[in-house]
Image (cartoon, coloured by chain):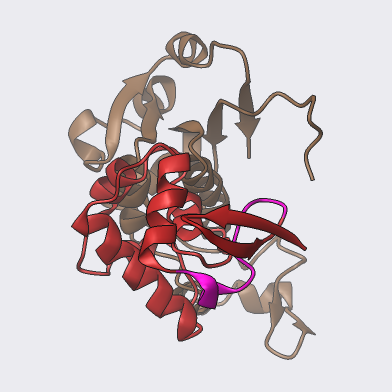
């Protein structure tokens, strides 16, 4: 599969700026996958992505039922945008997403972060977005190693074989 | 199909060194593979290997999460016991196919 001249990936720095279930999980799966492969991994949450590491919000992530043309009902029926606007629909769809994920043995957000950090992966929050959303260090969950400026993030991203991935 | 000798036994392996026939495995072979990977197997290693093999034989998927719930080790210990890529390394030593799970 890989070319013998390829240099293996040594470090990934993954940025998640959105707070929907699918955006957060894409970043978590990629980070955990890197850790499992023995690749150094740093996960950086910014803007709405901060919901994933905020104690108050991390267990309440949702999938958007509006503005999501790929969202379909069971049986592959298109999901009408107007239906998505009704109260409770977003919560219902999100609960369904979570139960599908549980069936595939995909852990909840906090447990996923426990797996990542136990394996040596590191999770960070963006300082600027924290200031913007008036969040404090104590609002963040225990799995967060620190709050970084963008300059500090780039310092972390040094070294040969490093990739920065914006999800 | 490639063959490789471990502890005096010829076994069938794929191009990545994973067993294609888990029946050919035994504990001495495990120790020999582990040595190639730079590991000395302890009782804890063997307990995990047994867990992995049982899970594989019963057709259940292997994931880091399942290790955490195994009651044998937590994830931190698992990474310490099989440093680097623990699930890949431990399944290779356990003589079972490389896990195809993304988690």
Taking the spot 21% from the left edge, 57% from the top edge, the residue there is B44
Q: Which chain is brown?
A: A
> Which of the 4 image quarters holds residue B70?
bottom left
Position of residue A49 relative to residue A10, above or below, is below
Q: Is residue B22 left or right of residue B49?
A: right
Taking the spot 51% from the left edge, 33% from the top edge, the residue there is A39
Give the prevailing secondary structure in the magenta stretch.
loop
Which range of residues does the magenta coloring cover? B15-25
Taking the spot 26% from the left edge, 46% from the top edge, the residue there is B76
Taking the spot 47% from the left edge, 43% from the top edge, the residue there is B85
The reply to whether residue A142 is visible in this rendering is yes
> Which of the 4 image quarters holds residue A6?
top right
In this view of the protein, which residue sits in the foreground, A122 or A8? Answer: A8
Residue A114: x %, y % from top left: 30, 50
Give yes or no for residue B16 being in the magenta stretch. Answer: yes
The reply to whether residue A64 is visible in this rendering is no
Give yes or no for residue A95 being in the magenta stretch. Answer: no
Q: How many marks?
A: 0
Residue A56: x %, y % from top left: 26, 52
Location of the N terminus of chain B by quadrant is: bottom right
Q: Is residue B25 left or right of residue A8?
A: left
Position of residue B15 relative to residue A81, above or below, is above
Position of residue A18 relative to residue B8, above or below, is above
Furthest residue toward front? B8
Residue A23: x %, y % from top left: 57, 51
In this view of the protein, which residue sits in the foreground, B29 or A164? Answer: B29
Residue A53: x %, y % from top left: 34, 43
């Amino acid at each position: 599969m890989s070319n013998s001249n390829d240099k293996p990936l040594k470090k990934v720095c993954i940025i998640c700026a959105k707070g929907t279930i699918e955006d957060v999980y894409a970043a978590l799966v990629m980070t955990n996958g890197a850790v499992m492969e023995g690749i150094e991994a740093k996960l950086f949450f910014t803007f709405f992505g901060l919901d994933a590491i905020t104690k108050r919000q991390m267990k309440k992530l949702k999938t958007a039922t509006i503005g999501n043309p790929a969202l379909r009902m069971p049986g592959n029926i298109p999901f009408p945008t107007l239906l998505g606007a009704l109260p409770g629909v977003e919560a219902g769809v999100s609960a369904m997403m979570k139960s599908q994920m549980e069936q595939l043995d995909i852990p909840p957000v906090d447990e996923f972060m426990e797996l990542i950090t136990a394996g040596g992966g590191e999770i960070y929050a963006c300082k600027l977005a924290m200031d913007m959303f008036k969040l404090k260090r104590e609002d963040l969950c225990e799995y967060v190693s620190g709050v970084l400026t963008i300059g500090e993030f780039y310092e972390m991203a040094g070294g040969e074989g490093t990739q920065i991935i914006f999800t | 199909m490639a063959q490789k000798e471990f502890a005096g036994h010829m076994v069938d392996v794929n191009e990545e060194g994973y067993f294609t026939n888990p029946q050919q495995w035994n504990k001495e072979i495990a120790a020999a593979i582990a040595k190639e990977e730079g590991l000395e197997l302890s009782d804890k290693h063997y307990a995990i290997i047994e867990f992995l093999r049982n899970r594989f034989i019963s057709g259940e998927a292997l994931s880091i999460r399942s290790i955490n719930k195994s009651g044998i080790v937590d994830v931190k210990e698992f990474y310490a016991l099989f440093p680097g890529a623990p699930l890949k390394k431990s399944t290779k030593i356990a003589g079972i196919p490389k896990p195809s799970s993304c988690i």
